[in-house]
Image: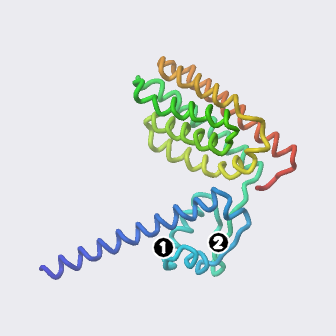
Amino acid sequence: MASTSQSKTAEIREESFAKTMTATAHLKLRQLILDNKWAPGFQATEQEVASYLGMSRTPVREALMRLQQDGLVTVIPRHGMRVLPVSTADMKEIYEILTSLESTAAELAAGRGLSDEQLHGLERATADMDHALSEDDLEGWARADARFHEQLLELGGNQMLKSVVLNFIDRAHRVRMLTLKMRPKPVNSTREHAALVEAIRSGDREKARNIHRAHRERAGTELLALLERLGLNHL
């Protein structure tokens, strides 16, 4: 009996370790793609990826399958993986999804009677955006902006909605970062975020939804117009 129990414990530990390795590989590879360190079109074999990460091929194979489900790579049998580009058509659809679902999150947050303490994270992110703009630190602004949107989704209280939206935010991230310095200085976003926080604080669900919908529609329209003007059909 003791031997059987020890064997099961060992199996559970091995399974847990394998899951941890796969999650680690997925996180590291995802970040390489989102930061444009592995640009669209980049290809590597499974063995090359495993060697880069210093891991065995099994967790890398599973991580690549997850990335394929995320829409970031295509897995080519016997040839490894290729990082997928993001097209203008993709971005249009992504922003339509973000506009709809994030507006719902804003409405949900406004209906939850959140305290000043719970809203502090949104206010801190907005203040950090303002400070970054005053220093012409666009990358710092982008980090604070991403933090604002993630916290908004958390405050909406719907974890399934948050998971779906974050996936699409990640898919848009590469294009947003590549075009960050090509776009006008994002002063409107900071003002819109501040207005949204006040609508949530006052519990005005309709106002919160409308402010965020207009925010996402404006940002999407500006980005798509820039891509079209520059002839950037795939990024």
Q: Nearer the viewer, residue 220 or 77?
A: 220
Which quadrant: the C terminus?
bottom right
**Against 85, is 195 above or below?**
above
Scheme by which the image is coloured: rainbow
Under mark 2, the amino acid is Met
Specify the farthest residue to the left.
1
In this rendering, does residue 114 appear at all? Answer: no
Specify the farthest residue to the front.
135
Q: Secondary structure at mark 1?
A: helix
Q: Nearer the viewer, residue 117 or 25?
A: 117
**Against 106, is 83 above or below?**
below
Q: Is residue 21 left or right of residue 232?
A: left
Disc 2: CA contacts within 10 A as few (<14), some (14-19) or many (>=20): many
Q: Secondary structure at mark 2?
A: strand
Q: Position of residue 66 (x, y in %)?
A: 54, 63
Mark-to-mark CA distance, 2 and 1: 14 Å
Residue tagged 2? 81
Q: Is residue 218 left or right of residue 80?
A: right
Q: Is residue 57 left or right of residue 68?
A: left
Q: Residue at x 70, y 38 (%)?
A: 136
Which quadrant: the N terminus?
bottom left
Disc 1: CA contacts within 10 A as few (<14), some (14-19) or many (>=20): many
Q: Position of residue 221 (x, y in %)?
A: 76, 36
**Against 190, is 78 above or below?**
below
Q: Nearer the viewer, residue 121 or 4?
A: 121
Residue tagged 1? 59
Q: Residue at x 59, y 77 (%)?
A: 46
In this rendering, does residue 172 appear at all? Answer: yes
* Tags 2 and 1 touching, CB below 8 Å: no
Under mark 1, the amino acid is Pro
